[in-house]
Image: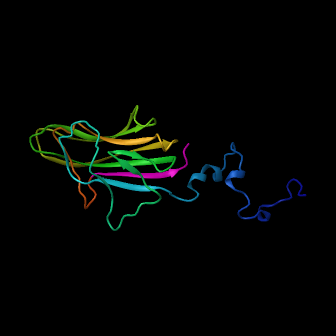
Amino acid sequence: TPTDGSVTANKIGTDAVTTAKINANAVTSAKMFSGFANGITELDQYRLTSDLTNNASNYITSNFERVDNAAFSKIGTGMSQSSGTFTFPSTGLYRIHVVAHIYIPSGNDGAAGVDTYFSDDDFSSTQQLATAWAGSTAGGQWYGTHSSECFVNVTNSSTNKIRFATNSMAAAILVGSTSINQTTFSFIRLGDSQ
């Protein structure tokens, strides 16, 4: 039987100390980064496939596709999407990044954006998390690409969901394409839920 202080580090097997064996209250690098042990397990990207015109301030419900260029590959199961509602494949802490390519035609003053909404009860209620916003003044034609990001702690993959909505898009166009990324929606699982 080993005595206190008699077991040195070089006598402990390489895989003998696992995360599960570390006390839940211990503050150690192994415990803090346990969610990253196997690297990124989920990564996915969708894009808008065609221009969205005169959508005012409404949820985007169609014209989504998973990026399908030869250079792209998702990691893991990937997000699922139905009528604009995105469902997470598993619990975890996710980064959501939106790139909105917005066109405001000549003669239209104002601003427009794309908002990110989260629900933890399958959209009985919602919370706005982020916005990608663009603006034009003096009636000038304007193109712009703006982005937003947020982090979502997904604790229930059945009820925690995401939707995207246009904001003040009545006089603007959200630009889409089925061949290249213009307006995109990216999801990366960074680690375990907190």
Q: Residue at x 35, y 67 (%)?
A: 71
Q: Is residue 12 shown left or right of residue 126?
A: right
Q: Nearer the viewer, residue 191 or 78?
A: 78
187 magenta-colored: yes
120 magenta-colored: no
Q: Quadrant of the C terminus?
A: top right
Q: Is residue 93 shown left or right of residue 150?
A: right
Q: Nearer the viewer, residue 27 or 157?
A: 157
Q: Is residue 98 shown left or right of residue 108?
A: right
Q: Which stretch did the figure color magenta? A: 183-194
Q: Residue at x 55, y 48 (%)?
A: 192
Measured as percent of width and height from the top left, residue 167 is found at 26, 37
**Residue sitting at the far bottom:** 70
Q: Taken as a whole, is the magenta stretch helix, strand or loop?
A: strand
- Location of residue 36 with respect to 166 vertically, above or below: below
Measured as percent of width and height from the top left, residue 73 is found at 40, 63
